[in-house]
Image: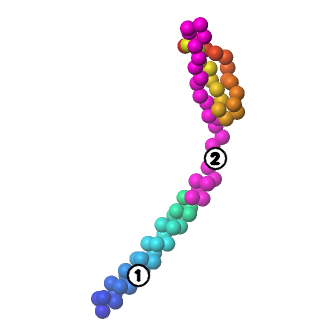
Amino acid sequence: MKKVFYATIFICFALFSNTLPCKALQQYQAKTQEIETFSDILEWRYKVINGKLYKRLYNLTDHEWIGDWILV
């Protein structure tokens, strides 16, 4: 009798433990697919002019310069 009881508990546990993580994973994947970033990727670019170091901000998303060269 104890073997039947433990077998029933084991089968129920096995069935429910397999379905719950799958549902949680599906909900997590659905939430992560809805997230989008809208910010631009910016990077400082450096160059030397007449022995002096200058920097300028570059937008990698739009491929355009932002501002003028700044003496560092």
Residue nearest the viewer, comparing 8 with 66: 66
Judge whether residue 56 is colored magenta. no
Amino acid of disc 2: Glu
How many other residues sit within 10 Å of disc 2, few (<14), some (14-19) or many (≥20)?
Answer: few
Task: Please provide percent x and percent y for residue 21.
Answer: 48, 66
At horizontal 67% and vertical 35% (from top left) the residue drawn is 61
At horizontal 64% and vertical 37% (from top left) the residue drawn is 39
Q: Residue furthest top?
A: 50
How much space separates mark 1 and mark 2, taking CA atoms? 41 Å
How many other residues sit within 10 Å of disc 1, few (<14), some (14-19) or many (≥20)?
Answer: few
In the rendered structure, the answer to whether residue 9 lies left or right of residue 21 reads left
In the rendered structure, the answer to whether residue 20 lies left or right of residue 1 reads right
Q: Which residues are magenta?
A: 29-52
Compared to residue 6, the image places residue 26 above or below, namely above
At horizontal 63% and vertical 53% (from top left) the residue drawn is 34
Q: Secondary structure at mark 1?
A: helix
Name the residue that disc number 2 marks. 36
Q: How many marks?
A: 2
Q: Earlier in the sequence, mark 1 or mark 2?
A: 1
Amino acid of disc 1: Ile
Q: Which image quadrant: the N terminus? A: bottom left
Residue nearest the viewer, comparing 65 with 35: 65
Residue 11 numbered tag:
1
Q: Secondary structure at mark 2?
A: loop
Task: Please provide percent x and percent y for residue 16.
Answer: 45, 75
Compared to residue 19, the image places residue 41 above or below, namely above
Residue 59 numbered tag:
none
Task: Please provide percent x and percent y for residue 64.
Answer: 70, 27
Judge whether residue 38 is colored magenta. yes
Compared to residue 64, the image places residue 21 above or below, namely below
At horizontal 56% and vertical 63% (from top left) the residue drawn is 26
